[in-house]
Image (cartoon, rainbow, N blue to C red):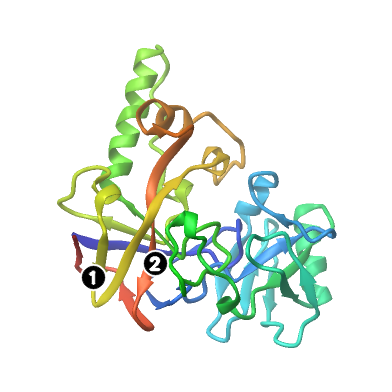
Amino acid sequence: MRLASIHLYPVKSLGGVDVPEAAVEPWGLRGDRRWLALNPDGTYLTARTAPRMLGITAVPRPDGGLDLTGLDGTVLHVDPPHGGQPAPTSMTRLDRVRLAGADAHGWLSAQLGQPLRLGWLDDPGRRSVALDHGGQPGDLLNLSDAGPVLLASTASLRLLNDWIAQGAVERGEDLPEPLPMARFRPSVVVDGAVEPFAEDGWQRVRIGDTLFRFAEQCDRCALTLIDTTTFTSGREPIRTLARHRARDGKTWFAVRLVPVGGPSLIRVGDPVTVD
């Protein structure tokens, strides 16, 4: 197997960027999910309720800042607010983030048509992976829901799209366009001689020289139903996953991993080995 692609989502629920390589830190990939949009009451906003978030692109800068491109094409550069005002957040296992400047709040609010603030996780060492999500003492986490790194395989997506097409034929519907991997917002995608959903049973994954530990399978939410170009919701892939990949009242696609060891680097094309 090989590493087919690497994806960063610097701001939770905003559009991300594909990169040829990424540094791996204890809490996830460098530049991934260190920012989030906050409502005035401190709850964080996601594309589940504000799907147009997916149309705003965030690119990480080497200094930890952001380059944001809006729905209208305007660009905003945001510096990391090291001395920014602390603000409470509803994010699990995290009490506060630091706020960016007023220009960032105003820009984001204008893009999404509601009052928002942009928050930054200054120290990922303050947030841990929950034990009920496969965490162990000392495991750290960025602003991802439950795990530092999400791995998906092209083989699993191909089979899922085959199942979706089969269901459409059975219902007498037109064949849909295959779902892109972007629906699942993975950190890393592997390709090669692997059976679909074999990743469910991997206990350790080595990408190049970097070792990861399996934490858990990933249950999928309504965010996967949103078309990332039209921002409209449909019934797939949850309808088909519920038919073929349901367990404990949830549907499952991809796996969460935890980095093992110190900081390292992964590159597209790296060999991938598992046990």
Label 1, secondary structure: give it: loop
Q: For this view, does 89 lie left or right of residue 235?
A: right
Residue position marked by numbered label 1 in the rendering: 270
Say which residue appears at 81% left-offset and 52% top-offset: 113
The reply to whether discs 1 and 2 touch (Cβ–Cβ < 8 Å) is no
Amino acid type, callout 2: Val
Instruction: Estimate the spatial distance between the alpha carbons at disc 1 and disc 2, rounded to whole Å.
Output: 18 Å
Query: Can residue 262 be seen at all in this image of the molecule?
Result: yes
Q: For this view, does 67 lie left or right of residue 81?
A: left
Q: Residues within 10 Å of mark 1 (few under 14, many from 20)?
A: some
What percent of the width, then of the height, locates residue 151? 36, 57
Residue 258 - label: 2
Amino acid type, callout 1: Asp
What percent of the width, then of the height, locates residue 244? 35, 29
Label 2, secondary structure: give it: strand
**Above/below status of 36 relative to 165:** below
What percent of the width, then of the height, locates residue 56? 63, 58
**Above/below status of 80 relative to 200:** below
Say which residue appears at 28% left-offset and 36% top-offset: 159
Query: Can residue 20 be seen at all in this image of the molecule?
Result: no
Say which residue appears at 61% left-offset and 37% top-offset: 232
In this rendered view, identify the residue nearer to me: 107 or 25: 25
In this rendered view, identify the residue nearer to me: 77 or 23: 23
Q: Quadrant of the C terminus?
A: bottom left
Q: Residues within 10 Å of mark 2 (few under 14, many from 20)?
A: many
Q: Quadrant of the N terminus?
A: bottom left
Residue 228 - label: none
**Above/below status of 197 relative to 46:** above
